Image (cartoon, rainbow, N blue to C red):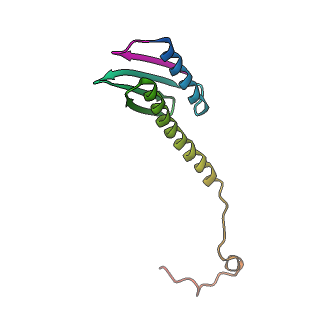
Amino acid sequence: MKVTISFRHLDHTPALDERIHEKSKKLEKFLGGRSNIRWSCYVKQGNHYAEVELTGPNYSYHAAAHTDSLYKSIDKVMTKIEKQLQKKKEKVKGRRKNNGHELQCNDPEMAWADYDEDYFQDVA
């Protein structure tokens, strides 16, 4: 997983860098190894913004949040992106369940009965 971090109008500190890498590692449980995470952190009109763009071979996710603290913004963004990934994971899991369905017969007696032409109306 490749992590890219950019800061605008904000000082880059090792504590922020460590926090972002720590949060990015949490996303590995949802993704394979071939993904790119791009973080953008900036200050605008007194609010601290954090944006995440997560891309891979077959997916692309984006989340953004702003609060009065950059650490809170990072936590909010992680909550949003995890919800998106969890929703996608549940969709895929649900699709796998539905593909394994069995053929059911509602009226077993009619299934083994002889074909009765009077029972069905003539279409032609």
Q: Name the quarter where the N terminus is drawn.
A: top right
Q: Please check the rendered image and state whether residue 23 is part of the magenta-colored stretch, yes or no.
A: no
Q: Which residue sits furthest front? A: 68
Of residues 84 and 108, the one nearer the viewer is: 84
Q: Residue at x 42, y 33 (%)?
A: 63
Q: Which residues are magenta?
A: 1-12
**How far across and down, in percent of the image, does residue 41 sit?**
39, 21
Residue 69's x, y, as percent?
A: 41, 25
Residue at the left extreme of this rendering: 45
Q: Residue at x 37, y 26 (%)?
A: 49
Task: Please name the residue shown 39% across and 16% down the image.
Answer: 7
Residue 11 highlighted magenta (yes or no)? yes
Q: Residue 112 lies in what quarter of the image? A: bottom right
> In the image, 12: left or right of 96?
left
Q: Position of residue 35 (x, y in %)?
A: 53, 25
Can residue 53 be seen at all in this image of the molecule? no
User: Looking at the image, which residue sits at the far bottom?
Assistant: 118
3 relative to 79, above or below: above
